[in-house]
Image (cartoon, coloured by chain):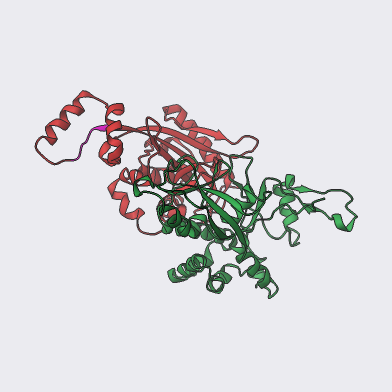
């Protein structure tokens, strides 16, 4: 099936999804961006995966876990000193840095014919983060947008291929932000790699950055 | 359009019940002995939606500080509340005697197995997202998107309050298919399995073949899950027509916008 689309369509067929991912992964390899392809045994299905260590203020973590966090995840001595200065004599929230482990999966949804971003987050000692804690890590600029509709949000879901709890950004509004980008590209007679465009928009919402070189170096599939 | 005959099937599906016995896990701390609690569970609903009474019953013998998020388990397997009750039963306990014995827990929530369910709105969001996905397959989401918020609410309230008419007043719109366009675009179905990491098989399947023949459940299984079909004995024996033999597998018909578990229908000898 040709990867052509009429202006109204923001959808992605599965073959194009896999081709876009292949091209994406080639560039990731080049710049050591850490993405890999996970194939489901015995099928031609798979997904892209990346794990990231993210420093966060431990104030976003539940207080009951802060004690263990401080001991296990203290990053530098400087941080400790800063905290003591900042909190001296003032009622303040403790801002010692901690490190969280985020694991991102890019899957294809047959039902909606678009890619979907799943992720899970845990502390370094393996404790899974709650939805509230993950929300705390969403950039404030994005929080309002995510709260607009009951389906347009961050929810806990079973991973459709692994059967384990993950968080998912609901695919409802994909068309809304993909359409302008795809129409513009078409008007300029350029062809975009759907995955690069899409991930550049949704990734940053949950702390996943897509370096600029992807948009210049990764081509669209033929 | 939905035929009049179907109404009996729809009612049978909706009003299907499973008798269950809830027992508190011996790991829980109680102030006095906890009696088991018996309940008829609606097949089409969700565990966390219909077990308020179970929770209240056990809370009476426990201290508040010993109570965290409630979760259920059957013979060591945490029960995924976001699966319809009928599916859970058919997957885990269909070959055992009734009542279905479920163990109740209030601590050590299995984070790696179960989704959290802090309130009914989480169940509502999950249910509506299933309805929405089914309509994406049936009607490219046109019908669900044309419905108003209050119509969506009515679907949910119908399920929550066990009101067949209230539910179907709205659901019938989602079940209409324009025959001139060949019916539903794709059939929304899920084949649940226990013997795999993958929670269910869900693929695109058109209800009509390229030659224009209406396809059946058998055609779907032959194409997507041939292991489920097993013809036993003499196929010419009228007592032995091809049977859909599902072992550790549960086929869901989500085109009814409800999950229908089809259990082992082999004759028992």
Residue B170: x, y in percent? 53, 71
Determine the residue positioned at 53% across, 60% down: B131
Q: Please name the predominant secondary structure of the magenta segment in the image.
A: loop
Residue A17: x, y in percent? 54, 43
Vertical relation: A92 (above or below) B256: above
Judge by depth and name the residue closer to the eye, A17 or A160.
A160
The residue positioned farthest toward the top in the image shown: A77
Where on the picture, by quarter, is residue B21?
Answer: bottom right
Vertical relation: B259 (above or below) B148: above
Say whether residue A106 is magenta. no
Asked if residue A122 lies left or right of residue B35, the reply is left
The residue positioned farthest toward the left in the image shown: A89
Q: Please indicate, yes or no, whether residue A157 appears anywhere in the rendered image.
A: yes
Judge by depth and name the residue closer to the eye, B127 or B116.
B116
Q: Which residues are magenta?
A: A93-98
Vertical relation: A24 (above or below) A138: above
Judge by depth and name the residue closer to the eye, A170 or B254.
B254
Judge by depth and name the residue closer to the eye, A189 or A57.
A57
Asked if residue A85 lies left or right of residue A141, the reply is left
The residue positioned farthest toward the bottom in the image shown: B4
Residue A42: x, y in percent? 65, 35
Residue B214: x, y in percent? 74, 62
In which quadrant of the rendered image does the N terminus of chain B lie?
bottom right
Q: Please indicate, yes or no, whether residue A222 appears anywhere in the rendered image.
A: no
Circle count: 0
Where on the picture, by quarter, is residue A97?
Answer: top left
Determine the residue positioned at 73% across, 59% down: B215
Looking at the colours in the rendered structure, which chain would you say is drawn in green? B
Q: Colour of chain A?
A: red
């Amino acid at each position: 099936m040709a990867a052509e689309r009429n202006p109204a369509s923001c959808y992605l067929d599965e073959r194009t999804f896999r081709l876009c991912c292949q091209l994406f992964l080639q560039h990731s390899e080049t710049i050591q961006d850490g993405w890999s392809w996970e194939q489901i045994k015995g099928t031609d299905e798979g997904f892209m995966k990346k794990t990231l260590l993210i420093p966060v203020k431990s104030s976003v973590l539940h207080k009951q876990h802060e004690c263990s966090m401080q001991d296990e995840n203290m990053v530098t001595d400087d941080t400790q000193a800063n905290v003591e200065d900042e909190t001296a004599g003032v009622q303040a929230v403790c801002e010692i840095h901690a490190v969280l482990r985020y694991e991102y999966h890019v899957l294809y949804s047959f039902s909606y014919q678009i890619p979907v971003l799943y992720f899970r987050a845990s502390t370094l000692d393996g404790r899974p983060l709650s939805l509230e804690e993950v929300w705390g890590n969403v950039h404030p600029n994005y929080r309002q947008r995510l709260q607009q509709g009951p389906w347009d949000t961050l929810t806990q879901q079973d991973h459709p291929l692994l059967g384990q709890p993950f968080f998912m950004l609901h695919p409802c509004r994909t068309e809304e932000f993909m359409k302008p980008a795809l129409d513009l590209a078409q008007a300029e007679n350029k062809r975009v790699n759907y995955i690069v465009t899409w991930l550049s928009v949704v990734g940053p919402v949950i702390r996943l950055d897509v370096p600029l070189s992807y948009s210049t170096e990764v081509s669209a599939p033929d | 359009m939905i035929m009049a005959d179907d109404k009996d099937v729809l009612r049978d599906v909706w009003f299907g019940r499973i008798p269950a016995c809830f027992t508190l896990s011996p790991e829980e701390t109680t102030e006095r002995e906890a009696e088991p609690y018996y309940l008829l569970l609606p097949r089409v609903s969700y565990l966390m939606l219909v077990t308020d009474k179970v929770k209240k019953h056990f809370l009476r013998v426990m201290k508040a500080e010993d109570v965290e998020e409630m979760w259920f388990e059957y013979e060591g397997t945490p029960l995924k509340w976001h699966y319809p009750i009928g599916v859970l039963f058919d997957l885990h306990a269909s070959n055992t005697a009734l009542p279905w014995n479920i163990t109740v827990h209030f601590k050590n929530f299995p984070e790696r197995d179960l989704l959290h369910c802090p309130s009914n709105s989480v169940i509502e969001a999950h249910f509506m997202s299933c309805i929405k996905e089914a309509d994406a397959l049936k009607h490219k989401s046109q019908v669900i998107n044309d419905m108003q918020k209050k119509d969506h609410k009515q679907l949910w309230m119908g399920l929550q309050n066990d009101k067949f008419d209230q539910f179907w007043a709205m659901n019938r719109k989602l079940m209409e298919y324009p025959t001139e366009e060949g019916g539903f675009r794709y059939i929304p179905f899920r084949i649940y399995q226990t013997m795999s990491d993958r929670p269910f098989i869900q693929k695109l399947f058109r209800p009509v073949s390229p030659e224009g023949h209406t396809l059946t459940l058998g055609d779907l299984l032959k194409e997507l899950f041939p292991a489920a079909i097993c013809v036993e004995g003499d196929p010419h024996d009228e007592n032995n027509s091809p049977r859909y033999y599902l072992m550790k597998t549960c086929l869901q018909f989500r085109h009814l916008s409800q999950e229908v578990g089809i259990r082992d229908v082999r004759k028992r000898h």
